[in-house]
């Protein structure tokens, strides 16, 4: 008789990957839609987070500003609660496997698929004088970023959903041809604040590279700037704080307020019943500024310790290379490269 007690095999911790471009200072949109969720995920998942500077050059960047923004973005991630002892936190260009896998995946991605990407259409309209091949193939580099780590979940804002669907298609296509090589990832999108809109045009996504600084709240804006930007936010003439179709500006402010305070839309409507937009806008500005204060303070502290930051990103790159090389070797073998 077999007397051994079988204990269930410990469940494999799932893997998370996500990234942010150093194309400016992180906005409230990047933060509420994506980065704020990255810290808490570290407790239950193996996480890898990257400053994706190779994606950033698909739009012309000033080299000095890009270098500075990369370091600042790295420090900001740590200030937002990402702990380099718990997660792999690295700068994309430090880990050569990303470009290497991207090249292979380019050969398994169809021209038609890339042509359908909304971000490509938007960015090529916005940068009509520089519609480069990198802008077009951005999604295959993003697929490489994700697939290299055998990622289960990708926490992003809703604007990136289409790119993740493409990454899934590429992974499935490659697996179909060569046998299981990549884990097929799932997007992980927050219910509220998945798409924070511009404060000056609430039909447009809030973007860190927007030319109008009043359109976005940067995580590093000081309290009075944040409140001023919310006070100027475009709303409507109805003066009723309610979440409804046609009230894009108010809907956006309600999503922000809800996301920061945890209050439901119904609670917010009752709280501001009979009060004007002025009161509501000040309240949104105040809770956002209070919420971001510790991030700003931690950021300032970290930027004074460049040696620590360098230690973290060098170590992050080493860990990322070690992990991603395993996937790249598998891919090279499958496509017939001599190893
Ligand atoms: N407005 C937004 N609302 C919610 N989530 C957002 N994200 C971006 N904007 C919003 C999410 O932030 C993460 C990092 O984004 P990114 O820097 O990689 O690229 P992006 O989506 O192109 O962001 P920006 O701010 O609009 O950059 P630029 O101006 O350079 O194009 C992603 O998870 C994204 O979904």
Image: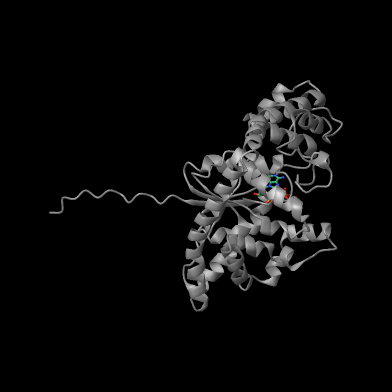
Residue 247 visible, this angle: no
Color theme of the render: one colour
Nearest the eye: 319 or 218? 319
Nearest the eye: 96 or 158? 96
Nearest the eye: 96 or 309? 309
Residue 301 visible, this angle: yes
For residue 214, side relative to residue 134 (left or right): right
Q: Which residue, as the protein is rendered here, is positioned at the far left?
A: 1
Q: Residue at x 73, y 52 (%)?
A: 66
Nearest the eye: 22 or 2? 22
Q: Residue at x 58, y 52 (%)?
A: 90
Is 137 situated above or below 19? below
Q: Which residue, as the protein is rendered here, is positioned at the far front?
A: 307
| Res 82 quadrant in image | top right
Looking at the picture, how far across and down is residue 81, in whole percent? 57, 38
| Res 78 quadrant in image | top right
Q: Which residue, as the protein is rendered here, is positioned at the far right?
A: 237
Q: Which residue, as the protein is rendered here, is positioned at the far top?
A: 274
Q: Residue at x 55, y 65 (%)?
A: 171
Q: Residue at x 56, y 70 (%)?
A: 173
């Amino acid at each position: 008789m077999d007397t051994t007690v079988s204990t269930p095999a410990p469940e494999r911790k799932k893997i998370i990957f996500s990234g942010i471009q150093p194309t400016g200072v992180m906005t409230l949109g990047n933060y509420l839609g994506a980065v704020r969720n990255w810290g808490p995920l570290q407790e239950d998942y193996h996480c890898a987070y990257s400053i994706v500077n190779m994606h950033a050059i698909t739009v012309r960047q000033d080299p000095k500003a890009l270098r500075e923004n990369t370091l600042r973005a790295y420090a900001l991630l740590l200030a937002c609660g990402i702990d380099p002892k718990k997660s792999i936190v690295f700068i994309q260009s430090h880990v050569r496997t990303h470009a290497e896998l991207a090249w292979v995946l380019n050969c398994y991605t169809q021209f038609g698929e890339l042509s359908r990407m909304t971000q490509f259409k938007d960015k090529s309209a916005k940068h009509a004088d520089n519609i480069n091949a990198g802008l077009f193939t951005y999604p295959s580099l993003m697929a490489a970023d994700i697939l290299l780590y055998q990622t289960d979940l990708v926490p992003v804002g809703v604007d990136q959903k289409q790119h993740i669907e493409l990454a899934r298609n590429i992974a499935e296509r490659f697996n179909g041809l060569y046998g299981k090589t990549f884990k097929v990832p799932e997007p992980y999108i927050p219910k509220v604040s998945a798409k924070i809109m511009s404060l000056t045009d609430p039909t447009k996504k809030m973007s860190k590279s927007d030319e109008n600084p009043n359109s976005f709240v940067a995580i590093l804006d000081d309290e009075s700037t944040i409140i001023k930007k919310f006070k100027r936010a475009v709303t409507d003439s109805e003066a009723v704080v309610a979440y409804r179709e046609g009230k894009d500006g108010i809907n956006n402010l309600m999503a922000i307020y809800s996301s920061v305070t945890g209050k439901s839309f119904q609670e917010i409507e009752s709280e501001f019943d009979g009060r004007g937009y002025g009161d509501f806008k000040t309240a949104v500005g105040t809770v956002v500024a209070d919420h971001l204060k510790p991030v700003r303070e931690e950021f300032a502290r970290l930027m004074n310790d460049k040696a620590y930051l360098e230690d973290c990103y060098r170590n992050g790159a080493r860990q990322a290379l070690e992990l991603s090389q395993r996937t790249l070797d598998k891919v090279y073998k499958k496509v017939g490269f001599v190893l």
